[in-house]
Image (cartoon, rainbow, N blue to C red):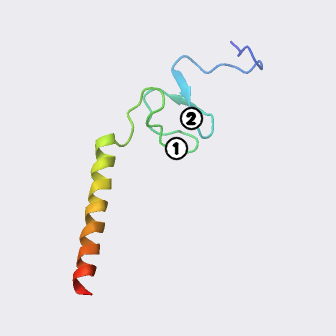
Amino acid sequence: MTGAAEGVPLPPPEYRNVCPLCGTPAPEHGMRCVECNYHLGGVGGRPVPWTSRALWVTVAAFLALFVITIGIVALTH
């Protein structure tokens, strides 16, 4: 079976997607590309390695640390 556009062979049925970095067909159950070791989170229905909540908690923690540091510097000068 070949692709319609260029006559390129289509990947086997067990491969639903390809690596966005190198284009190697990725197995459905794999979390990393077998060719370039790229993390495939978020590709083809895979879960992403971080959540939106984790991102906002991290941003809030850095902001709190920044405010505390500025407060300490302001009090000592």
Nearest to the observer: residue 73 or residue 54:
73
Amino acid on which the number 1 mark rests in the picture: Tyr
Quarter of the picture holding the N terminus = top right
Q: Position of residue 56 (x, y in %)?
A: 31, 48
Q: CA distance from mark 1 to mark 2?
A: 8 Å
**For residue 46, which numbered disc appears in the image?**
none
Furthest residue in direction right, as rendered? 6
Residue found 42% across the figure and 29% down from its top: 29
Q: Which residue is mark 2?
A: 19
Q: Position of residue 54 (x, y in %)?
A: 29, 46
Crowd around label 2: few <14 · some 14–19 · many ≥20 (10 Å): many
Look at the picture and state if 48 lies above or below 29: below
Crowd around label 1: few <14 · some 14–19 · many ≥20 (10 Å): some
Amino acid on which the number 2 mark rests in the picture: Cys
Dot placed on the residue nearer the N-terminal end, 1 or 2: 2
Q: Which residue is mark 1?
A: 38
Look at the picture and state if 22 lies above or below 29: below
SS under mark 1: loop
